[in-house]
Image (cartoon, helix red, strand yellow):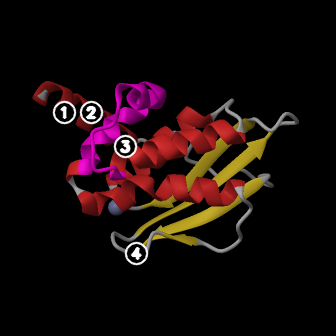
Amino acid sequence: MSDLRDLYQEVILDHGRRPRNLREIAHADRRARGYNPLCGDQVEVFVDLDDEGRIADVAFVGKGCAISQASTSMMTQALKGRTVEEARELFDAFHDMITAPSDPSPAVLERLGKLAVFAGVRDYPNRAKCATLGWHTLVAALEGREEPVSTE
Ligand code: ZN
């Protein structure tokens, strides 16, 4: 299990150092800003939807701890091509994995795919807000909320 932990940590550190889809989308269909005052993490998420309501492009800019930036980076990779409803389901699964008192079920882990690397965050409750900041911001963007999201 500790080898697996190391591997997970490597993936998170890699995304933290070199976040994917780290750019603004000019004239994005949807955008929202999020802030985690507990840690000082900030992200802004941009989403472009195609004619069928699928996520054609998603990107972010931000600064903060490795967990917050890596989580948002991996989120953008997981979302491309998904419908808004699928994105919400993925958010629910991710949120459950990190905040639920019991271990995530194999079905939830399978649905999350690579995002399951964040399962270890459950052992560090004060990191949960870092890991979910990008996701809360995504949901705000999809819902067209103007107010910045705060995890507090
Ligand atoms: Zn953080």
Would residue 146 be found to the left or right of residue 61 on screen? right
In the image, the segment drawn in magenta is: 99-122
Q: Position of residue 103 (x, y in %)?
A: 27, 39
Q: Which residue is mark 3?
A: 97
SS for dot 2: helix
Question: Is disc 2 surrounded by few (<14), some (14 to 19) or many (20+) residues within 10 Å?
Answer: some
| Vertical arrangement, residue 42 with respect to residue 54, above or below | below
Q: Residue at x 34, y 50 (%)?
A: 100
| Vertical arrangement, residue 129 with respect to residue 101, above or below | below
Q: How many marks?
A: 4
Circles 4 and 2: CB distance less than 8 Å?
Answer: no
Q: Which residue is mark 1?
A: 5
Q: Residue at x 53, y 45 (%)?
A: 91
Q: Which residue is mark 2?
A: 8
Q: Nearer the viewer, mark 3 or mark 2?
A: 3
Q: Residue at x 88, y 36 (%)?
A: 51
Q: Which residue is mark 4?
A: 37
Q: Quadrant of the N terminus?
A: top left
Callout 3 amino acid: Met
Q: CA distance from mark 1 to mark 2?
A: 5 Å
Q: Quadrant of residue 7?
A: top left
Callout 1 amino acid: Arg
Would residue 137 be found to the left or right of residue 25 on screen? left
Q: Position of residue 80 (x, y in %)?
A: 64, 33
